[in-house]
Image (cartoon, helix red, strand yellow):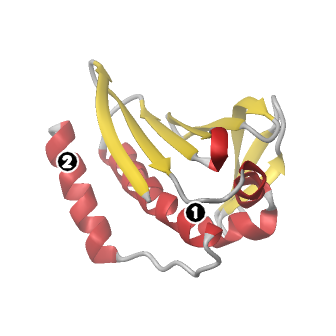
Amino acid sequence: MIKSEILNIADGKWLALFTNTHGYTAEQVWEVLTDEEYVKKWHPELRTHELHDGGNLIFDFGNGKIHKLPIREFKEGKVYGFDWYGSYIRFEIKEGGQLLMTFKVNEVDEQSLQDLTGWTMINEAIDATLHGENFTVDKEKAGKIRKEYEREMKL
């Protein structure tokens, strides 16, 4: 089960919280978040290149171009957070394997709105991966989510 909420934390800054309670162990959740083969299932362009404090993730555009995403926070088996094109994404595994994903929007614009919508769908893809299922983005659902964010964030 995924619970989500979006909070206005400061003038122009927002925090989206996604809590995923699914019945898997912390170790299983960590593996899905960090093992390259699992990561490709929930975000095909993302690579866990240097997954450690001070390391980075790689966004592979698929055309030979890559972009490094600095890891700002890392605790093995528990937490990692990284920069995402002006925003910040953080995964935290709570007691009992519960996954808390946060997406901090530092500036609301078209790109951050698109990214927030995308990461909302990716959270569902992570859940599907945990359950051993394939995930396909429902574009109609994504469009509705985006409109809801636009309304909430008054964009």
* The one of 115 and 38 positioned closer to us in this rendering: 38
Q: Badge 2, how many Cα within 10 Å: few under 14, some, many 20+?
A: some
In this figure, what is the number of numbered marks? Answer: 2
N-terminal label among 2 and 1:
1
* The one of 97 and 67 positioned closer to us in this rendering: 97
As drawn, the residue found furthest toward the top would be 10
Residue 96 placement: quadrant: top right
Say which element carries label 2.
helix
Pinpoint residue 77: horizontal percent, then vertical percent.
79, 41
Foreground mark, 2 or 1, reads: 1
Q: Is 116 situated above or below 35? A: above
Pinpoint residue 124: horizontal percent, then vertical percent.
47, 64
Identified at 42% across, 40% down, the residue is 17
Say which element carries label 1.
helix
Q: Is 115 displayed left or right of 25 in the figure?
A: left
Pinpoint residue 65: horizontal percent, then vertical percent.
70, 60
Mark 2 belongs to which amino acid? Glu
The alpha-carbon separation of the residues under discs 2 and 1 comes to 24 Å
Residue tagged 1: 126
Q: Is 35 displayed left or right of 82 in the figure?
A: right
Identified at 75% across, 58% down, the residue is 28
* The one of 64 and 32 positioned closer to us in this rendering: 32
Identified at 43% across, 62% down, the residue is 121
Q: Badge 1, how many Cα within 10 Å: few under 14, some, many 20+?
A: many
Pinpoint residue 83: horizontal percent, then vertical percent.
60, 36
Residue 41 placement: quadrant: bottom right
Q: Looking at the rendering, in which quadrant would you find the C terminus?
A: top left
Q: Is 142 displayed left or right of 75 in the figure?
A: left
Residue tagged 2: 150
Q: Is 92 displayed left or right of 16 in the figure?
A: right
Identified at 22% across, 64% down, the residue is 144
